[in-house]
């Protein structure tokens, strides 16, 4: 064969005994630089032997479900749902085969006629202008594209070259040996891109027409079959010109199906009269469309930050967005509804002040609800929030709010740990100055500030016990108590009960630690109070209970718990905090009809307000503050939920929200009681008893040690 002859035609010799009954024995290539390459042995020179193709699992969506198995969110890198061939309509199968590879069930790994026709056209055009690839070869190409990790690898997988075509042939030979034709067709339909961000036929059917792949009509199937050739050029979401191209391609497919007698001409003509019918069903997924966006965000960040779900950040991201797993969570939708309703009753989504609440189960740490008054989103004029206001920064949250007097609980617990009894106490003055050396942090450094004096909003000086000082939330009493038990010991107690700052920074170790100057999130505070409900056991907040992988393997996750404080100390602390509802700052709000222990919290000048509490079955924490900056935007002279407030305290809004939430959330939960206090250990008073009351004088004046409650009772 002369160089001129080799440049004008191609000879593809077919031998015997190859994979799937086809062997390409040799290819005559065109002349290069005037020298004919002649006939090259495919087996020896081009290595046209079957080569195994690595087929990584397809990137699939990850589904998030609630504690009852109902979907609440989904994540994905590419929108795809893998279905078996039986889950695809017959019309779709016929349409894709008719337009892409009508002899698919007859030829081997390559279509000799199609390849000859394409190569001849390419040689005459001076490039690779025509495909001729079988469905098997197209599947191979899609696998190579999907497993490419870099732009360079993706370009190599789609480059216009004979080298790539030869590689596809080698892989196609192995694929046809490994799978049946039906299996290959199913794989192709699940991997193909159809446009409009839909990968795979199931996602495309839902995205384009709002139906499952098994429900595709003839016209709909022809539309999708027509889209795979140039999905970007026919992407219907890009405008009228693209939809017109897609409509034309649909009609080409219908004509081809009629020509091949897969349908009648009448059926084709009837289908061609139908409108395109593209619905553009919104892409599912992401926390933005979840009914529980804040909980959804917590789950997402837990996956991305927890080494349990991947050793590296990249591995965890792929696990979340490509894993095709089902994540079962701890959220209880009835409890979530209770929290949402209680917040909506008192705080509006468009108020500057924002309320948020978390519910946690004592003894497991399971997060049952995460609610907030603000809607999740990015529209500022609607005051939407784009970060997780209920959790810490690690889980997508912000810097939190100062927790106020809810922190007095840690000082109370520390005092009980050190042997004080519930009626032991000390004198509370009208003011308290820390001095230079009155308090030491956990490094042994003096952190007193003599320039600052702590005062009470109301209440006269006098002797307070652990009970009466707690019920009245007396600031000066708790400063003196913290000084007595030791600032560092109080900090250690708080840390043992799971306390850490919302922003992830170290706790601020200052004398007013007991007054709650550290910024907290409701999840963390609720989990700390749950320790009392669980008799001293602290459990890390837990949002994920089990994960089922794409193959059906189930991995269950157990609570991570430890004994933080002595069970009897927890019982005694709960006993004291029960009185907050009947004799303390919540007495105007009242209890919930079952055993409950809690504490109000209000920061200086009403910057923020809290309520945190627990039952043996459920703990919760509610905060309210202005996310624009609580210090500069205090809760004084404000309208919240359509109601004017001169000042907002812990019992003003957070307390009632907590109460309503708990009553509704525990409606069908049997009542569980706290363990009674060990009276022999904690009852009465020991070495710090109250001084004997002086008798009333004839004028009926009260003795100085009568307890007066602080302003928080309002």
Image (cartoon, rainbow, N blue to C red):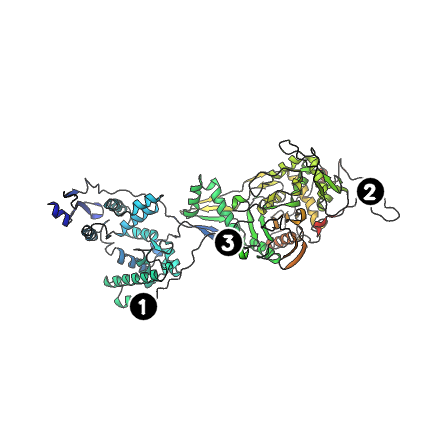
| Numbered tag placed on residue 693 in the rendering | 2
Label 3 vs label 1, nearer the camera? 3
Q: Quadrant of residue 705?
A: top right
Q: Nearer the viewer, residue 246 or 344?
A: 246
Q: Quadrant of residue 228?
A: bottom left
| Residue assigned mark 3 | 378
Q: Nearer the viewer, residue 541 or 451?
A: 451
Residue 71 in view, yes or no = no
* Distance between the alpha carbons at the discs numbered 3 and 1: 42 Å
* Distance between the alpha carbons at the discs numbered 1 and 2: 98 Å
**What residue is at 70 percent from the left and 48 percent from the top?**
580
| Residue assigned mark 1 | 273
| Numbered tag placed on residue 68 in the rendering | none
Of the two numbered discs 3 and 2 on the same chain, state the one appearing first in sequence.
3
Label 3 element class: loop
The residue most toward the top is 444
Return the x and y of residue 346 as percentages of the image width and height: 62, 57
> In the drawing, does residue 353 fall left or right of residue 179?
right
Disc 3 to disc 2: CB gap under 8 Å: no
Q: Quadrant of the N terminus?
A: top left
Return the x and y of residue 667 as percentages of the image width and height: 61, 55
Of the two numbered discs 1 and 2 on the same chain, state the one appearing first in sequence.
1
Label 2 element class: loop
Label 1 element class: loop
């Amino acid at each position: 064969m002369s160089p001129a002859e080799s440049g004008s035609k191609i000879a593809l010799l077919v031998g015997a005994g190859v994979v799937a009954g086809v062997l390409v024995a040799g290819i005559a290539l065109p002349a290069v630089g005037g020298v004919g390459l002649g006939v090259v042995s495919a087996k020896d020179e081009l290595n046209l032997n079957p080569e195994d193709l690595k087929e990584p699992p397809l990137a699939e969506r990850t589904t998030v479900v609630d504690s009852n198995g109902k979907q609440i969110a989904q994540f994905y890198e590419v929108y795809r749902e893998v279905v078996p061939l039986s889950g695809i309509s017959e019309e779709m199968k016929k349409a894709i085969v008719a337009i892409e590879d009508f002899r698919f069930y007859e030829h081997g790994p390559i279509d000799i006629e199609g390849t000859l026709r394409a190569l001849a056209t390419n040689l005459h055009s001076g490039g690779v202008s025509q495909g001729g690839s079988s469905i098997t070869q197209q599947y191979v190409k899609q696998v190579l594209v999907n497993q490419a990790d870099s732009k360079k690898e993706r370009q190599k997988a789609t480059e216009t070259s004979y080298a790539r075509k030869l590689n596809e042939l080698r892989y196609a030979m192995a694929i046809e040996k490994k799978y049946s034709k039906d299996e290959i067709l199913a794989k192709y339909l699940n991997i193909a891109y159809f446009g409009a961000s839909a990968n795979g036929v199931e996602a495309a059917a839902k995205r384009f027409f709002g139906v499952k792949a098994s429900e595709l009509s003839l016209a709909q199937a022809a539309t999708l079959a027509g889209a795979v050739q140039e999905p970007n050029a026919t992407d219907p979401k890009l405008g009228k010109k693209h939809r017109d191209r897609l409509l034309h391609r649909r009609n080409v497919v219908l004509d081809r199906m009629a020509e091949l007698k897969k349908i009648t001409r009448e059926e084709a003509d009837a289908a061609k009269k139908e409108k395109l019918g593209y619905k553009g069903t919104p892409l599912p997924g992401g926390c933005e469309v979840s009914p529980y966006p804040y909980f959804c965000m917590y789950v997402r960040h837990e996956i991305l930050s927890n080494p349990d779900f991947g050793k590296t950040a990249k591995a965890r991201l792929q696990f979340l967005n490509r894993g095709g797993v089902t994540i079962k969570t701890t959220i209880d939708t009835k409890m979530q509804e209770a929290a949402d309703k209680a917040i909506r009753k008192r705080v509006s989504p468009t108020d500057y002040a924002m309320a948020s609440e978390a519910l946690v189960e004592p003894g497991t740490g399971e997060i049952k609800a995460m609610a907030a008054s603000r809607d999740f989103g990015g529209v500022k004029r609607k005051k939407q929030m784009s970060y997780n206001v209920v959790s810490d920064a690690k889980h997508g949250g912000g810097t939190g709010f100062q927790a106020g007097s809810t922190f007095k609980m840690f000082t109370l617990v520390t005092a009980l740990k050190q042997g004080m009894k519930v009626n032991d106490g000390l004198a509370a003055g009208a003011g308290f100055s820390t001095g230079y050396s009155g308090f030491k942090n956990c490094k042994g450094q003096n952190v007193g500030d003599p320039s600052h004096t702590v005062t009470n909003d109301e209440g006269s000086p006098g002797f307070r016990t652990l009970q009466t000082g707690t019920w009245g939330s007396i600031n000066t009493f708790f400063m003196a108590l913290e000084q007595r038990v030791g600032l560092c010991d109080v900090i250690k107690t708080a840390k043992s009960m799971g306390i850490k700052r919302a922003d992830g920074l170290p706790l601020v170790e200052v004398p007013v630690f007991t007054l709650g100057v550290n910024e907290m999130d409701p999840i963390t505070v609720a989990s700390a109070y749950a320790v009392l409900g669980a008799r001293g056991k602290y459990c890390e907040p837990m949002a994920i209970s089990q994960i089922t992988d794409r193959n059906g393997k189930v991995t269950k996750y157990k609570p991570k718990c430890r004994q933080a404080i002595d069970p009897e100390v927890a019982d005694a602390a709960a006993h004291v905090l029960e009185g907050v509802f009947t004799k303390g700052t919540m007495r105007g709000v009242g209890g919930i009809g079952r055993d409950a222990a809690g504490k109000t919290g209000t920061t200086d000048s009403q910057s923020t307000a809290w309520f945190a509490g627990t039952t043996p079955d459920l703990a919760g924490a509610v905060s309210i503050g202005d996310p624009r900056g609580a210090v500069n935007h205090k809760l004084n002279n404000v309208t919240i939920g359509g109601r004017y407030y001169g000042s907002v305290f812990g019992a003003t809004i957070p307390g009632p929200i907590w109460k309503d939430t708990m009553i509704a959330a525990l409606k069908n939960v049997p009542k569980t009681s706290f363990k009674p206090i060990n009276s022999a250990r904690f009852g009465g008073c020991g070495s710090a008893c109250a001084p004997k009351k002086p008798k009333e004088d004839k004028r009926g004046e009260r003795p100085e040690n009568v307890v007066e409650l602080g302003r928080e009772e309002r």
